């Protein structure tokens, strides 16, 4: 039996029938065959090259939010190019290198081919497509503007993921440095200080208090290192499990996080940006305000803003204006409330919300850069004190002997 020709993943760029620039990925046996498939789809390929393999492998088998974001953009691009919905699923699904994502897309395609609308197919997969995503797609299908809605979903998800990435980057640097410091100190305690301890034991003299403290700490660490790491790991694991399983703990942490200096300000601006971006997208899709507020509350990412948004929903359902409810909540700056008020009066609330979202996303970006600049010298000073203190403590007896001689 002949072996099937090997297929590779190719990254392509080109123009559609209207001359609009489009790009994507597709699997094929060669770049010439991929270009031929693209031409049959009405796309004029300008570039087509083999996709380089990642240096450290991939997270195959697991669907990440980024995968759904890329899928949304690809589907929107395909529909803009005039590719039928079912064929678009076939192209995207077959060309995806993540088996789990490929199975998901082809499963949606099968449901659509069986006569289900896209909303029903997505609703069957709530782990990958949340209520907000499904509601927007449903609004697009009912209004006959699915292509435009998919573009808005793609933009929304790209900006949301970018915002999450900025928040993570603000927390990653200090966490990585702390972990590195723990590793360095552990190595010094286990391997380096015992060597000095053996040397000092031959002096037959009293050691400086700092040196004696470090040696005693090292002896304790060497004798109990397994229990120390077990307690540290168990504490971290237990805290994460409690946070995951206890709603009360999640609510408490969400409330406390907004009060942390600098970081709390970043989280607050992030929540406002998500609020504005989600509501803008829902408005643009034609979703009624009261119905949109539930999805907006879930997208804020913080229990304080969730509770406030649900309260605002109840107030709006009784006839209160959005800007009045926002002002009453006390969570939104006056500038945000005023822009929403102008949007309500002019009938362009989605445009004003988009400007608010753009502003606060930039604010988060600037705040993250400022936080990184603030943390760098503080962390370096901390490491200098800890590691420098250990080094000085180990050399104090030697300095003392030198002064006596």
Image (cartoon, rainbow, N blue to C red):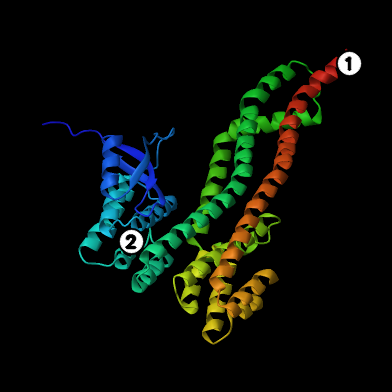
Residue shown at 32%/48% (left/top)? 43
* Quadrant housing residue 45: top left
- Answer left or right for 18 relative to 90: right
* Mark linked to residue 404: 1
Q: Residue furthest bottom?
A: 318
Q: Is residue 258 above or below residue 209?
A: below
* Quadrant housing residue 201: top right
Residue 186 point in image, percent of width and height? 62, 32
Residue 123 seen = yes
Neighbor class of circle 1 (other Cα within 10 Å; few <14, some 14-19, many 20+) is few
Q: Secondary structure at mark 1?
A: helix
Q: Distance between the Cα atoms at labels 2 and 1?
A: 77 Å
For marks 2 and 1 on the same chain, the one whose residue lies earlier in the sequence: 2
Residue 373 point in image, percent of width and height? 70, 44
Residue shown at 41%/52% (left/top)? 20
Residue indicated by mark 2: 125
């Amino acid at each position: 039996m002949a072996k099937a020709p090997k297929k590779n993943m190719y990254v392509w760029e080109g123009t559609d029938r209207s001359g609009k620039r489009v790009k994507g990925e597709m699997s094929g046996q060669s770049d010439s065959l991929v270009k031929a498939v693209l031409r049959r789809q009405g796309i004029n390929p300008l570039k087509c090259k083999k996709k380089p393999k990642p240096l450290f492998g991939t997270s195959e088998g697991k669907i990440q939010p980024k995968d759904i974001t890329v899928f949304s953009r690809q589907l929107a691009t395909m529909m803009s190019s005039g590719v039928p919905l079912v064929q678009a699923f076939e192209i995207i699904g077959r060309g995806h290198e993540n088996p789990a994502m490929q199975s998901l897309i082809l499963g949606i395609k099968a449901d659509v081919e069986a006569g289900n609308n896209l909303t029903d197919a997505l609703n069957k997969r709530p782990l990958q497509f949340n209520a907000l995503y499904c509601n927007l797609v449903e609004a697009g299908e009912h209004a006959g503007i699915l292509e435009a809605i998919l573009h808005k979903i793609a933009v929304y998800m790209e900006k949301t993921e970018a915002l999450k990435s900025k928040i993570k980057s603000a927390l990653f640097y200090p966490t990585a440095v702390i972990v590195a410091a723990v590793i360095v100190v552990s190595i010094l305690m286990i391997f380096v200080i015992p060597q000095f301890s053996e040397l000092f034991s031959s002096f037959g003299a009293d050691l400086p208090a700092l040196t004696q403290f470090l040696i005693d700490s090292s002896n304790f660490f060497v004798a109990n290192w397994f229990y120390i790491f077990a307690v540290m790991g168990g504490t971290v694991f237990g805290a994460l499990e409690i946070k995951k399983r206890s709603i009360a703990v999640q609510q408490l942490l969400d409330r406390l996080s907004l009060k942390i200096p600098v970081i709390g300000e970043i989280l607050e601006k992030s929540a406002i940006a998500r609020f504005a971006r989600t509501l803008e997208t829902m408005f643009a899709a034609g979703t009624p305000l009261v119905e949109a507020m539930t999805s907006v509350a879930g997208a804020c990412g913080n229990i304080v803003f969730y509770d406030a948004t649900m309260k605002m929903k109840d107030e709006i359902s009784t006839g209160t204006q959005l800007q009045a409810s926002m002002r009453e909540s006390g969570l939104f700056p006056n500038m945000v409330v005023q822009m929403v008020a102008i949007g309500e009066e002019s009938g362009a609330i989605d445009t004003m919300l988009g400007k608010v979202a753009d502003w606060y996303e930039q604010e988060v970006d600037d705040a993250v850069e400022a936080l990184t600049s603030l943390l760098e010298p503080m962390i370096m000073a901390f490491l200098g004190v800890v590691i420098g203190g250990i080094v000085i403590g180990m050399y104090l007896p030697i300095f003392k002997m030198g002064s006596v001689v």
